Image (tube, grey):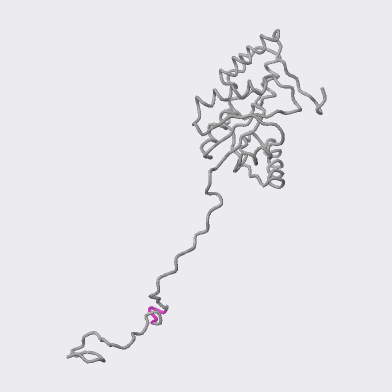
Amino acid sequence: MFNRGGCLNGCDVWSSQKPISTRDVPIGGSVYSDRMPEAKQIKPNPFDGEKVGLFPGTFDPLSNGHLDVIVRGQRLFDRLVVAVGRNPAKREVFTTDERVDMIQELVEDRCGAHVEVASFSGLTVDYAKNIGATAILRGIRNVTDLNFEFQLALTNRAIADVETVFIMTGEVHAFTSSTLIKQIASGGDIDRLSPLLPSLILERLREKKDANDGVVPWSHVDHLKE
């Protein structure tokens, strides 16, 4: 027989009175709470947008080392812009338009549709800001590169708040540079550069040399003077 305070025969106690909250009942030495945890407020991630990478350079000419960085770097971004610029300290072999066209052809064969090729002038950090780049992509060949690129990356972040992402080049490309390639092309058989250059670039470089009476139209400009 039940009453308002309990029941007979050792059954569970029932009461019409307000039950004691289990949040105040110690269990195993700790306090158990019957309250549902409050929903955690998730702050919006400012980096949830499109990840845009910028790979800048003169690419005069584009080497297999450059192409290696582009192919591997494309996996890191939703959109990767290969930007062809001009170095006033160097006299160019190929015009800006020629370089853009060659790189575009190579990129179409080896990369996804999210890799673009463009040209720019002025400071790299300004162009990065204009296209909304998340980071600047750079290839590192050796310790000498690292010292220079580290200083450049810190400067870019300080003056433009642009981050830099580094990729180590493949070991077979560690000794390659566009300046070295042009020096070899100027002084001998261009076919010796086949391990260093895509076949398209090699062919265009050969055509350029033949069109200039066997001379590669290039020289290094020291201290920005002719």
In this view, 42 is above or below 185:
below
Work out which quarter of the rendered image holds the N terminus and state it: bottom left
* Span colored in magenta: 25-29
Taking the magenta stretch, the answer to whether it contains residue 152 is no
Work out which quarter of the rendered image holds the C terminus and state it: top right
The x and y percentages for residue 155 are 72, 44
The x and y percentages for residue 133 are 60, 41
162 horizontally vs 17: left or right: right
Pick the residue in front: 105 or 141: 105
The residue depicted at 67 percent of the width and 31 percent of the height is: 120
Q: Main secondary structure of the magenta part?
A: loop
The x and y percentages for residue 184 are 68, 17
Total labels drawn: 0
The residue depicted at 71 percent of the width and 38 percent of the height is: 148
The x and y percentages for residue 42 are 49, 59
Pick the residue in front: 193 or 74: 74
> Residue 134: which quarter of the image?
top right
Pick the residue in front: 149 or 5: 5
In this view, 150 is above or below 181:
below
The furthest residue to the top? 213
104 horizontally vs 178: left or right: left
> Residue 166: which quarter of the image?
top right
The residue depicted at 65 percent of the width and 41 percent of the height is: 129
23 horizontally vs 70: left or right: left
The furthest residue to the front? 130
